[in-house]
Each structure stands twice: as C-alpha cells, then as structure tokens.
C-alpha cells in the first residue's frame, strides 16, 4: 500500500514571554487551511502533535504544557490603524481540539518582531537604529495591542539585558500596551465586570459559597482568595499539579465562573472551553522561594497570585492574566485590590511561581462605571528556529 508523503509548511518557532509556539504567515498555509474550519484545526493539531494520550508531544512541535502547545497565524492587516492581524490557537494536549476563544499575552510579545522580520511591516517603517511601534489587531478577541520593538542595524534586536522571571536567559525588552482591553470590537467601552459586581459569591459544589471577583480584561478570569480554598498563594507547580482533588476543585470554580460570566450556557460546556476563563487565587505579600530558587521577598511585591491554564498551575503567569490582574488591582474593592493593600494604584508588582512581574493599568471611574484605557508590561521574545514543519499530506 502506498503511504502518504509529507507536506512542508514554512514556519518559525518562537519564544514570546514565558511561552513558545509555532508561527505561520496566513499565506504560507495550504489553501484549505487559510480559512477557519476543520482542515485548519487538523493541520495545527498534527503540527503540535495532538491529541497525544501519552501527554508528551513526542511526534510534534508542542511541549506538552499549556505554555508550549500554541500556534499563531499572522497576516497584514486591512483594518485602519493596524499593521498586522494576529490569530492565536491554544492546542489541547490530549484532545482533538484547538481553542480560538482568546489571546495569549505572552506570545503577543513575539508578534511584532515576527512581523518586522517577515515582511509584514513596510521597510520605510524600520529605522536603522531605534524603536518600531507596531499596531496589532488581536483577531480572537477584537482588541488592539501596541508593541514597541528595538531595532539595531535595521534588524530586530533580540539579545539584551532584560530579565524576565520564568525565562532562563536575558534578552531585549519589548514593551506591550494592551489598549482598552475591555472594549468591544465596535469601539464601545465594554464591560470589565460581567456580573456588574466587584465581588460575587459563587456556589461551588463541595465548597459552598466562595467569594470571587470576575473580570473580562485581557482574558476572562475568576479570582478567589487563596486562604478560602486552603492555600497561601505561594504554592509552586508540584504542590498543585500533583493533587487531583485540588485540580478538580479549581476546575469546578472555573466552570461555575464561566457559567456566571455568561461564557457557557451550561456546566457541561466548560470542558469544551478549556482556555477560558482562567481561575486564579490571590493572597497578601509573603516571602517564598520561586521555582528557580530565587528568593521572593514580601516587601518587594504587592500581592501573590497563582493562576491555572488548561487545567494546570502555570509555571509563571500568562500575559493576558497579568492584564486581568493589573486591571483588578487598579480598581478599589476587588479581591485583587484588597490583597494588594486596597486603595487606588496605577501599577502592581505580584509574585508568581517563577518570580515577580510588574504591570501598570490606567483605570478610570466615570458615572459609576469603570473603564481601563491601557494595561502595560514588558516582556521579551526570540526566534528559536526557522524553516519548515512537516506533516503527513493526508492530515486533512
């Protein structure tokens, strides 16, 4: 019997923030995969190596974690005021499913460097030395991200001295501004708090009523107090991810939050919406040892936060969740704000499993409603490999 041959597709493997993924130009994809649908999903699943019952991604480009099972599709933007359209896919590890419901804030850092290096930004925009400002349309959620990318000798500068906890080596700093992160695609203000409340009581089976704050900025996120579920907020991955009971509890909180936020119609749908919402637990500042061995000192941070992604505690912090944290911290009365010491603030530094991160937010109250103009943070990005990915020609 004749066996199917491989097809090869131009791709770039990049790190962005504390994540990495496979980047494609839309026009480089096979024709059938240039539009959303089953063919595109099948192709990307095979590229990553999913679904993998062994949970290793041995036969694909994925890294068998939520931070490394990601794909990005980019194209020149036809939207006024924007340079590039950015579509993100979170690939399930053990199920034949690609979640297109939200953004990856970490990989957002790599979008503009990729666009500059791959002809998506006109050469007249690229100085010999300086900073290129790239306006990104985040197509999954209809939001604008502005990236500020350093350029040296006419090329993206990747090497530098900026250190990002959760990333082993220093690199050049890329600043990201998430503009009007709660706004609707039509430009209207949008809703930060989907229930209309700063604090809600969630009824979670097996727990009862649980105090929470639910926000829509960056990525839909359900915040709870660490102490309310028996934690301190200084836990590392092994403590959480090795405990099936704890993971089940946190998934139950996430599912109830998704229902309350109107993201799903019934609890059963939560399993099919793995990427959103996120669930995070917060606590007051505390000393702890990060996963790298770094000592985090309570006096250097405003609060501690731990967040789950795709059913597991994240090794650092998702960029989109950092947007949600920055937003909630800036609004007096939320659980995040109270954990950070309450009061008004324009920035917050929080401890996560790999170290610390600082994020700024411009929140304004008008007529009893809160709006967020911008959330900013710094990350870094780097090309790991460029060439072709190969998948069987009969994948779709």
Image: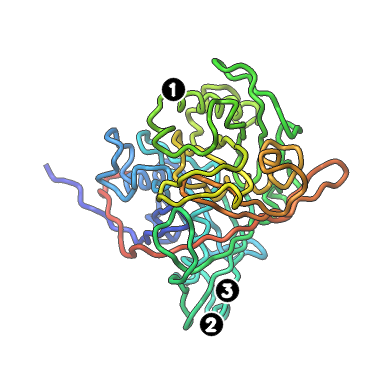
Are the residues tagged 3 and 1 within 8 Å (C-beta)?
A: no
Whether residue 188 is visible = no
Q: Position of residue 354 (x, y in %)?
A: 46, 49
Q: Residue 132 shows which numbered tag?
A: 3
Say which of 237 and 258 sits in front.
Answer: 237
Task: Please give left or right for residue 320 compared with residue 392 in the image.
Answer: right
Disc 2 secondary structure class? strand
Q: Residue 129 shows which numbered tag?
A: 2
Task: Please give left or right for residue 390 compared with residue 245 in the image.
Answer: left
Question: Which of pointers 2 and 1 indicates the residue nearer the eye?
Answer: 1
Q: Residue 6 shows which numbered tag?
A: none
**Gap in Å between the C-alphas at discs 3 and 1?**
48 Å
Query: From the viewer's perspective, is residue 391 above or below residue 337?
Result: below
Q: Position of residue 205 (x, y in %)?
A: 56, 16
Question: Which of pointers 3 and 1 indicates the residue nearer the eye?
Answer: 1
Q: Residue 245 shows which numbered tag?
A: 1
Query: From the viewer's perspective, is residue 156 above or below residue 102?
Result: below
């Amino acid at each position: 019997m004749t066996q199917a041959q491989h097809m090869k597709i131009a791709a770039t493997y990049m790190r962005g923030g504390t994540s990495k993924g496979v980047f494609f130009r839309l026009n480089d994809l096979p024709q059938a995969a240039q539009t959303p649908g089953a063919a595109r999903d099948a192709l990307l699943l095979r590229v990553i190596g999913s679904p993998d019952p062994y949970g290793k991604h041995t036969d694909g480009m994925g890294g068998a974690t939520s931070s490394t099972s990601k794909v990005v599709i980019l194209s020149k933007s036809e939207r006024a005021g924007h340079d590039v359209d950015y579509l993100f896919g979170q690939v399930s590890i053990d199920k034949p499913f690609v979640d297109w419901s939200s953004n990856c804030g970490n990989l957002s850092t790599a979008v503009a460097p990729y666009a500059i290096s791959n002809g998506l930004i006109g050469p007249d925009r690229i100085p010999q030395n300086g900073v290129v400002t790239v306006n990104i349309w985040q197509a999954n959620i209809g939001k604008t991200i502005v990236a500020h990318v350093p350029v040296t000798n006419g090329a993206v500068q990747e090497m530098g001295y900026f250190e990002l906890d959760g990333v082993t080596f220093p690199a050049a700093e890329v600043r990201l501004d998430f503009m009007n992160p709660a706004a609707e695609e039509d430009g209207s203000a949008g809703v930060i708090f989907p229930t209309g409340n700063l604090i809600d009581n969630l009824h979670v089976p097996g727990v009862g009523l649980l105090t929470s704050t639910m926000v829509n900025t960056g990525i839909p996120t359900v915040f709870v107090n660490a102490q309310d579920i028996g934690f301190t907020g200084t836990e590392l991955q092994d403590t959480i991810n090795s405990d099936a009971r704890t993971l089940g509890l946190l998934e139950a909180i996430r599912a109830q939050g998704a229902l309350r936020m109107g993201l799903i119609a019934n609890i059963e749908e939560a399993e099919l919406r793995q990427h959103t919402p996120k669930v995070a637990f917060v606590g007051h500042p505390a000393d702890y040892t990060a996963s790298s061995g770094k000592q985090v000192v309570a006096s250097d941070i405003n609060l501690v936060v731990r967040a789950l992604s795709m059913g597991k505690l994240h090794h650092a912090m998702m960029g989109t969740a950092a947007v949600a944290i920055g937003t909630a911290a800036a609004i007096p009365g939320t659980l995040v704000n109270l954990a950070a010491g309450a009061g008004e603030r324009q920035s917050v530094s929080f401890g996560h499993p790999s170290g610390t991160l600082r994020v700024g937010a411009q929140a304004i109250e008008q007529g009893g409603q809160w709006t967020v103009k911008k959330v900013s943070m710094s990350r870094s990005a780097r090309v790991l490999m460029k060439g072709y990915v190969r998948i069987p020609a009969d994948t779709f």
